[in-house]
Image (cartoon, helix red, strand yellow):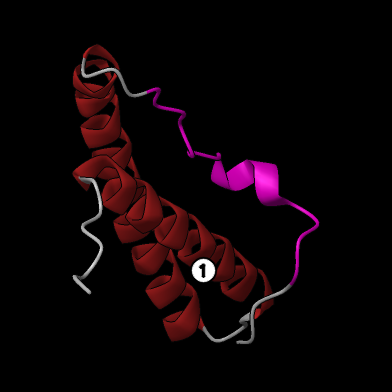
Amino acid sequence: MGKKVEHPLDILREELQQTNVALKCAYDKFNYVTEPELIEASIYEISALKARYSYLLRCIKEQEPAARSGGRTAVSAAVAASAGKGGPVCPV
């Protein structure tokens, strides 16, 4: 049996979801650290993850019209990082 080939849009959505989870964890870590160096590191981590999230979201939005015209219904899996408040706390 052959290996299932994923659609590039599905791969982007999965990466976006993973980045969203990592961003939530980074915000949780920022909220609990007290050392100045760790606070600074958390800020850089959040900034990098937000840039990656924006990039992936832009890629998905650019590819969705092409997916729709191919007869496939595309549903965005993007969830704002702030929408996850109250979720599980990631280990620090």
Q: Position of residue 52 (x, y in %)?
A: 28, 51
Task: Place residue 19 in its image quadrant.
Answer: bottom left
Q: Position of residue 22 (x, y in %)?
A: 47, 67
Task: Decide which of 57, 31 is in the foreground and name it.
Answer: 57
Q: Which residues are magenta?
A: 73-88
Residue at figure coordinates x 81%, y 56% from the top left: 86
Q: Is residue 72 above or below residue 37?
A: above
Residue 50 appears anywhere in the view:
yes
Residue at figure coordinates x 64%, y 78% from the top left: 90
The quadrant of the picture occupied by the N terminus is bottom left
The residue indicated by pointer 1 is: 26
Q: Position of residue 37 (x, y in %)?
A: 42, 84
Magenta stretch, main secondary structure, is: loop
Residue at figure coordinates x 64%, y 86% from the top left: 91
Task: Place residue 58 in its image quadrant.
Answer: top left
Residue at figure coordinates x 28%, y 33% from the top left: 60
Task: Decide which of 4, 59 is in the foreground and name it.
Answer: 4
